[in-house]
Amino acid sequence: MKNKLILFCLAIAMAAGASAQELQAKVTVIASRVPTTVDKKIFTTLQTQLNNFLNNRKWSNEVFKQNEKIECNFLLNIESVIETNVYKASLTVQAARPVFNSSYQAALVNFIDADIAFKYIEYQPVEFNDNRVQGSDAMAANLTAVFAYYAYAIIGLDFDSFSPKGGETYFQKAQNIVNNAPEGKNISGWRVFDGLRNRYFLMENLMNSRYNIVHDVIYSYYRSGLDKMYDAEAEARSNILQSLIQFQAFNKENPNTMIVQFFMQSKAQELIGIFKKGTPQEKQKAFEVLAQLDIANTARYKQDLQ
């Protein structure tokens, strides 16, 4: 009887492990700009529901161990009240993945989505259906569509960083959200004419077959570069430099694509740390490449690498 009980407990534990969720997400909702006439408790409830939505849902068929979950942060900043129960907000999305043989977490995503409008009534279900993205209320559905989109994008980028073009399945799921996104007054960010740095263009860049080199760059930067820094630092640095040179060539052929800025965001300090230990030739080449890929941080690269 005791052996049967042990086996039953093991089976339960294995079943729980087999369905382990992919994300270790922290959602924070800030409503300091909302008028005092609005009950702020609503946003505490929303924060709890969004945390449960991201962390309790299975986003893939893959099995993630607890230490393999993708660490990510979502900061939803409510900027104004458009009308009763309808809000305008910005969303800061951050995600990282561990580097092999170290405690370092390398940034995968650090992006601000500045144009999100949504409807929320306290305790309304926060749900998402891949087959019915628009939902019965477009403004309410927009909130979960945005969060689901970034969940798939994060998982896709994580898989891309561990295997060549490994994230394609999840980019396709995110693209499905773009293709079937809610439509309506004040809803923006899903369409080609909604700007040059939005959800539409991020996924267009990641799904465009002419841009396949982007996935090679992501893989080589993380897997052949950062993950080898502990065991073979010189080789890893060379691989990272080669991946950046590839990205530079891509940028010349395809100027002003969103993915370049998206990839380079928040990597300046990381790259300076990598190349400061390089040879003078590597430092010079890295500076030349980075000055074109990350113009906003040119002065920092010049100071530390020249």
Image (cartoon, rainbow, N blue to C red):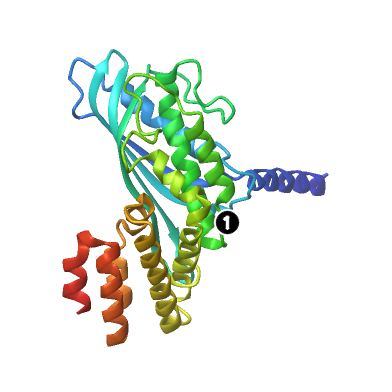
Q: Is residue 306 above or below residue 223?
A: below
Question: Who's the residue at 29% across and 58% down the image?
Answer: 266
Q: Count neighbours of disc 1 (C-alpha within 10 A) and say few if under 14, some if 14 to 19, many if 20 or more.
A: some
Q: Nearer the viewer, residue 207 or 228?
A: 207
Please tell me in which quadrant of the rendered image residue 20 appears.
top right
Provide residue 130's location: percent of width, then percent of height. 57, 31
Provide residue 297's location: percent of width, then percent of height. 21, 63
Question: Who's the residue at 40% across and 28% down the image?
Answer: 143
Question: Who's the residue at 30% across and 75% down the image?
Answer: 286
Residue 212 seen in the current view: yes
Q: Quadrant of the N terminus?
A: top right
Element marked by disc 1: loop
Query: Horizontal placement of 274 versus 181: left or right?
Result: left
Query: To which residue does mark 1 refer?
Result: 166
Q: Is residue 161 above or below residue 13?
A: below
- Residue type at tag 1: Gly
Q: Quadrant of the C terminus?
A: bottom left
Query: Horizontal placement of 113 versus 161: left or right?
Result: left
Q: Is residue 42 above or below residue 296?
A: above
Provide residue 169's location: percent of width, then percent of height. 59, 47
Q: Nearer the viewer, residue 79 or 187?
A: 187
Provide residue 232's location: percent of width, then percent of height. 46, 82
